[in-house]
Image: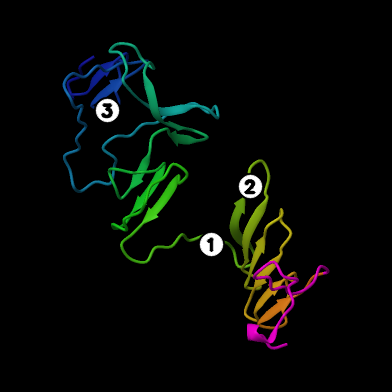
Amino acid sequence: TVNSDGTVGIGTTNPSSKLHVNGGSKYLGGGDWTTIERITTTEDNYALYVQSTGTNANQAVAKFIHSSTAGSPNVGTEVAAIRRACSYFLSNVGIGTTSPTQKLHVYVGNGSAPTDSNTHAVIEDSDHSYLGIYGGSTSDVGIHFGDSAIDARIKYENDNRKLKFAATGTTDLMTLDSTGLGIGTITPGAKLDVRGSQGYLKFDTSGSDGTIKSDYNLKL
């Protein structure tokens, strides 16, 4: 349907926009590029707006495939999808770079970041570079380590300003706060507070019995 106001309807006699396609559709573009261009600098609307009326958790809004066969939908190598419950990328993702070296590569400046197969996320800058993890004023923030369970943890408690380290599950073995460093205690009472039932302090430089000698420059 072509109306006198210039709107075109395909599958509908009452188009609500310049081009209104009702029902399943397919577009086969030739050449190297298919361009969608919005010629305006005064409006905030998107150049491309994709929406779905589905409510299923796996409802897909958009899917991206390469190496496909012309005329054969959903056939080829999938690289990304935007879905209602989750979206994903199956290729490397670069933020600030067009040539990401890892699964996630955040680039601000050239820091000569090394690459290896065991590194999956990189934050790179030629200046100071931090990873920020923030939470509520009475909440904890941190990092968990392990395979099928939490085997170790670094935790910062925002409410009492303590940095805690756990090497076996979630039991804190070392704590750092404004008072000092506590080993075997989460409430250090001095700059260095070491506690434990297996002995407090041991020096062993050559397989000896760990005796503390005066030439170690240690005062007790």
Q: Nearer the viewer, residue 60 or 77?
A: 77
Q: CA distance from mark 2 to mark 3?
A: 54 Å
The x and y percentages for residue 177 are: 63, 76
Question: Mark 3 or mark 1, which is nearer the start of the sequence?
Answer: 3
The x and y percentages for residue 213 are: 70, 83
Task: Identify whether 91 is placed above or below 26.
Answer: below
Is 111 positioned to the left or the right of 182 in the image? left
Is 112 positioned to the left or the right of 212 in the image? left
Q: Residue beneath label 3, please?
A: 17
The x and y percentages for residue 180 are: 65, 79
Residue positioned 72% across, 80% down in the render: 212
Q: Give the amino acid type for the residue marked by disc 3 in the picture.
A: Ser
| Secondary structure at numbered mark 2 | loop
Camera-near label (1 vs 3) is 1
Q: Nearer the viewer, residue 137 or 69?
A: 69
Query: Which residue range is magenta in the image?
Result: 197-220
Q: Is residue 206 magenta?
A: yes
Q: Give the amino acid type for the residue marked by disc 1 in the picture.
A: Tyr
Q: Residue beneath label 2, please?
A: 146
> How crowded is the residue under tag 2: few (<14 C-alpha within 10 Å), some, or many (20+)?
few
Tags 2 and 3 touching, CB below 8 Å: no
Q: Give the amino acid type for the residue marked by disc 2 in the picture.
A: Gly
Residue positioned 41% across, 51% down in the render: 122
Q: Residue beneath label 1, please?
A: 134
Q: CA distance from mark 2 to mark 1?
A: 22 Å
Question: Mark 3 or mark 2, which is nearer the start of the sequence?
Answer: 3
| Secondary structure at numbered mark 1 | loop
Q: To which quarter of the image does residue 27 belong? A: top left
Quadrant assignment for the N terminus: top left
Q: Is residue 125 magenta?
A: no
